[in-house]
Image (cartoon, rainbow, N blue to C red):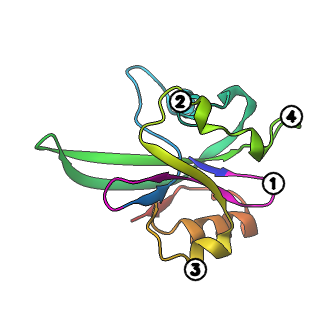
Amino acid sequence: MVALDDAGSVLLLRYDEDSGFWATPGGSLDAEEDHLTALRRELREELGVGGDAVQFTGQIAERSKQHKVGGIDVLQVERYYLAYLTYLAYLTAADLDPERADQPDGIVAHRWWGVDELRRTHETVYPLGLAHLITEILATGVPEQPVVLV
């Protein structure tokens, strides 16, 4: 998911695997789970936030990647939804607390990034093209069709 606050900053999570990188929150679907249910679960698991307190839009982007998992070729399809984490008056960016997470999944830090910071950073950020995607959303709104990311 692409989680934005009221200032247009995006929430990224830091992982130290693969020489370290920042990424948007999210994860895989559990059996018989739809995407919005999975997003709410991931918010609780990774960030300690009740997912019912978050406003989601439709799908804004998609990325497909062929890679090996356990020696088996798989096609991973990532769907990105826009989440406004400060939608309700009582939920602020400060309420995000990965220390309360059920399953932190190797997350070592979280941080709100401005679009300009994303453009200037030399750190690895996934998905690629995130700064451009956010710039377009802030300028013109949610795309009618999901943007294809590489």
Assess whether mark 1 and mark 2 are in contact (beta carbons under 8 angstroms). Answer: no
Drawn side of residue 61 relative to residue 90, left or right: left
Residue at horizontal 73 percent and vertical 43 percent from the top = 85
Q: Earlier in the sequence, mark 1 or mark 4?
A: 1
Q: Position of residue 107 (x, y in %)?
A: 47, 44
Amino acid type, mark 1: Asp
Label 2: state its secondary structure: helix
Kindly identify which numbered label has been placed on residue 120: 3
Tag count in the figure? 4
Q: Comparing marks 2 and 1, which lies closer to the viewer?
A: 2
Q: Earlier in the sequence, mark 2 or mark 3?
A: 2
Magenta region = 4-19
Q: Comparing marks 1 and 3, which lies closer to the viewer?
A: 3
Residue to which mark 4 is pinned: 90
Q: Quadrant of residue 55?
A: top right
Amino acid type, mark 4: Tyr
Number of other residues with Cα within 10 Å of mark 2, as a class: few under 14, some 14 to 19, many 20 or more:
many
